[in-house]
Image (cartoon, grey):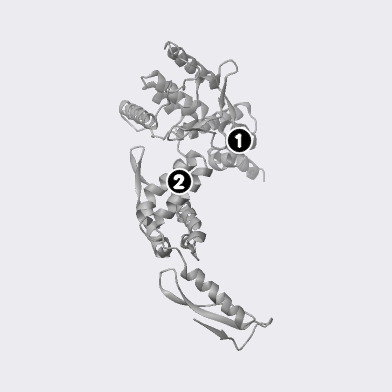
């Protein structure tokens, strides 16, 4: 560590600099040369500040910093958001980094964590699969947020998480449409409904298919939220994994119009519920005085898909998650819209369609287009017509 004078000053007269040693991304000492200063005094002061910052990093365990981060996060965010990132941390970050000191974590550690995450698998609809790039990057963002939180508190100079970067998809990876967006057709859904022997579950799955509502919104819904006179469902609440009531995902209250099949099924099921002496409009539609548990929902779905495929004794009907009934709702509407346009010989207007549907689904038009536009294959017909007219 010393102050030096360069023989060739800059145009504005800066020629003094200092050299020090600091650890590189792999933890090895590396010589560092500063920028140049106008005077020896300025260079010395800059050197002093650099050494104070370098030598006074706080030696804290990663898990202790993470606990502080989550306490602050919980006070300012929705329960659902908090639970989601906490789950990612507990399952995929804590065991790897928890007992490391945060000022000793290197870029090599981050790379090894990413390699391990690439290899992880989980069970989805009775199949073992790798985590999606979206989920991997969600975990990356949690790790990066914790590290950003630690930097000013622990005197860290470099964010090694950002230096390594997020998970990137291989450029040559082929992703077929059915893997981009999974859904069940209305024909297969009707077969699925036929094997359900319980009124509540039959109503529950018909409700998901014909409203496209999110799982948390459906669990939070009470009979008082359904207006049978106007055929409207009022959606303004969501239920998280710990059965806490919050606002909807995008904080949007919305009204969902019901079709005849859904109205008939809901009225049938409500008449059944009204036979109980303590029935109340405050009851949850699915679960009565207490909401359905997440485990019960998943078990029922798996049970009836198993029963359906046992009865089919042929080509297995694709199993979907509860959230993918939401995709199925949109897919069903797109197919019917295309059929209607073709039968009336009118132009398919995807902008108008997504404008109408975005309010029903509680999404922006942009999100709707990015997610579902590829389900409009007949738009290519208009392009071919233009080419044929050349």
Q: Is residue 262 above or below residue 70?
A: above
Q: Is residue 205 above or below residue 249?
A: above
The answer to which of 45 and 215 lies nearer the viewer is 45
The earlier-in-sequence mark between 2 and 1 is: 2
Between label 2 and label 1, give the one nearer the viewer: 2
Residue at 41 percent of width and 49 percent of height: 89
The kind of secondary structure element at disc 1 is helix
Q: Is residue 148 above or below residue 363?
A: below
The answer to which of 301 and 169 lies nearer the viewer is 301
The answer to which of 127 and 246 lies nearer the viewer is 246
The kind of secondary structure element at disc 2 is helix
Residue 168 seen anywhere in this rendered image of the structure:
no
Q: Is residue 105 above or below residue 178?
A: below
Residue at 39 percent of width and 26 percent of height: 192
Q: Which mark is residue 354?
A: 1
Please tell me how crowded label 2 is: few (under 14), some (14-19), or many (20+) other residues with Cα within 10 Å: some
- Decide if residue 258 is on the left or right side of residue 204: right
Q: In the rendering, at what x and y percent does residue 132 appear?
A: 43, 47
Please tell me how crowded label 1 is: few (under 14), some (14-19), or many (20+) other residues with Cα within 10 Å: many
Q: In the rendering, at what x and y percent does residue 210 appear?
A: 50, 26
- Residue that carries the numbered disc 2 in the rendered image: 85
Residue 8 seen anywhere in this rendered image of the structure:
yes
Q: In the rendering, at what x and y percent does residue 263 appear?
A: 52, 18
- Determine the residue located farthest toward the bottom in the rendered image: 7
Q: How many marks?
A: 2
């Amino acid at each position: 560590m010393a102050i030096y004078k360069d023989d060739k000053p800059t145009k504005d007269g800066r020629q003094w600099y200092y050299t020090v040693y600091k650890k590189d991304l792999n933890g090895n000492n590396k010589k560092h040369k500063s920028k140049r200063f106008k005077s020896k005094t300025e260079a010395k002061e800059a050197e002093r500040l650099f050494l104070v910052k370098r030598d006074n990093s706080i030696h804290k365990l990663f898990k202790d910093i993470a606990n502080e981060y989550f306490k602050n996060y919980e006070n300012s965010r929705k329960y659902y958001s908090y639970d989601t990132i906490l789950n990612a941390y507990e399952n995929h970050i804590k065991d790897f980094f928890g007992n490391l000191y945060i000022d000793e974590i290197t870029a090599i550690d981050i790379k090894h964590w990413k390699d391990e995450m690439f290899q992880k698998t989980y069970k989805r609809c009775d199949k073992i699969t790798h985590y999606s790039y979206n989920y991997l990057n969600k975990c990356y963002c949690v790790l990066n947020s914790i590290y950003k939180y630690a930097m000013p508190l622990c005197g860290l100079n470099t964010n090694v998480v950002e230096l390594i970067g997020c998970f990137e998809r291989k450029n040559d990876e082929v992703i077929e449409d059915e893997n981009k967006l999974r859904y069940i057709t209305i024909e297969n859904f009707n077969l699925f409904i036929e094997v359900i022997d319980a009124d509540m579950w039959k109503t529950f799955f018909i409700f998901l298919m014909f409203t496209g509502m999110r799982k948390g919104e459906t669990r939070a819904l009470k009979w008082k939220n359904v207006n049978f006179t106007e055929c409207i469902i009022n959606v303004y609440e969501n239920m998280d994994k710990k059965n806490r009531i919050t606002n909807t995902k995008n904080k949007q209250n919305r009204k969902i119009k019901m079709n005849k099949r859904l109205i008939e099924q809901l009225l049938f099921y409500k008449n059944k519920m009204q036979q109980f002496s303590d029935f109340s409009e405050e009851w949850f539609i699915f679960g009565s005085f207490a909401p359905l548990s997440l485990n019960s929902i998943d078990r029922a779905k798996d049970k009836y898909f198993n029963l359906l495929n046992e009865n089919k004794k042929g080509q297995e009907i694709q199993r979907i998650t509860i959230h993918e009934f939401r995709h199925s709702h949109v897919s069903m509407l797109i197919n019917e819209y295309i059929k209607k346009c073709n039968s009336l010989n009118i132009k398919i207007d995807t902008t108008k369609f997504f404008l109408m549907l975005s309010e029903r689904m509680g999404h922006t038009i942009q999100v709707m287009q990015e997610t579902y536009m590829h389900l409009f294959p007949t738009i290519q017909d208009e392009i071919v017509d233009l080419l044929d007219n050349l």
